[in-house]
Amino acid sequence: MAKNLIERLDSGILLCAEGYLFAMERRGYLSAGAFVPEVVLEHPEVVSQLHREFIRAGSDIVQAFTYYGHREKLRLIGKEELLEPMQKNALQIAKDAAKEFKDLDLMVCGDVANTNIYDPNDKQTHVECQRMFEEQVKWAKEAGVDFIIAETINWTGEMEIALKAIKQEGIIAITNFAIPKGDVTREGHSPEDACKMMEDQGADVVGLNCYRGPEMMMKLLTKIRDKVSCHVSALPVPYRTTEDYPGFLNQPADVVDSQCSCIPGENAFPVALDNLYCNRFEMAEFAKQCESQNINFIGICCGAEPHHVREMAVALGRKPISYKYYPDISRHWLHGKDDSFLDINTSMSKKY
């Protein structure tokens, strides 16, 4: 019998590659701003290929691209009628991708995200959030996912609603908060207290995703790990954020890139963050930090690419499928060491 998520985590780290929104925007398949994943209907083959690339890089999880494929996001672009087919297509694409790699012990998960309509002082929005979460959880359950992640939520109250929707269907739940500047949820709960509240209410794994880069997320994760007894998850964005600007949503354009005056507006998010991009080795260091802290569900959120995931896998002592093409600079004509290389080239390596 296949192990469930908790049994797998008891045995060690699982890698989860996310980042579909930014990856698809960069490739020209969805619009930044609304970030609605219409690509799962318009170009399903592109989503399938990204799943394959993440799997080949070492992701243990195939996460259905249902993120932001909810009723409120579709209302913004006038396409609410696409909600059910979008959700079901994304779930099927993920399942089909996992089936392609029969020799790997892959898991498939569903996803619910911030609704952007939650108001702690308006009970009607709570009802609407619940309906939105419940319909998404229902489709994920019908698809037979192994677990569901509730993520990028910065209201503790909204996360409670999402968790309830998942657990009332008897599904394993991960609750990942996105913590803004100030290091607290929107109500003022510390990340560790908010995560403890979710654990007490039935969450199987608790933690953080999005908003923060590796360093700014890790400073919160250690407190969470000390506070809770369940497994902890950690999926930062691969961008270098700082104490002054811990989240990537509000990065002043002139701070992000002082040598560029052509970024439209004053905010570099979401399409001019290139100068903050983490290299693959930074993400590998994050993976090793998580391993040392007993944080066993790890990955990358918005901005992830397969090379980041592969380096995290290698840092954990693994050789994923795409390790076949792992860099070998010794074979490079200018910087390499092969005896067949011409000295007139290698001697110039520091002059190019």
Image: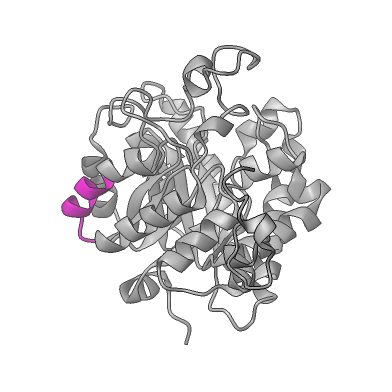
For residue 114, above or below residue 317 = above
Q: Is residue 72 magenta?
A: no
Q: Nearer the viewer, residue 352 or 144?
A: 352
Q: Position of residue 165 (x, y in %)?
A: 45, 50
Q: Residue at x 56, y 18 (%)?
A: 259
346 vs 243, left or right, is: right
- On-image quarter of the C terminus: top right
132 is higher (above) or lower (below) than 342: above
Residue 37 at least partly seen: no
In the image, residue 41 above or below residue 315:
above
Q: How was this image coloured?
A: one colour
Residue drawn at the location 68% of the way across and 56% of the way down: 345
In this view of the protein, can residue 310 be seen by the observer?
A: yes
Q: In the image, is 190 to the left or to the right of 102?
A: left
Instruction: Please name whichever residue, 309 or 94, is drawn nearer the observer in this view of the structure.
Output: 309
Magenta span: predominant SS is: helix
Q: Which residues are magenta?
A: 221-230
Residue drawn at x 37%, y 53% as measured from the top left? 286
Q: From this viewpoint, which residue is outermost toward the right? A: 42
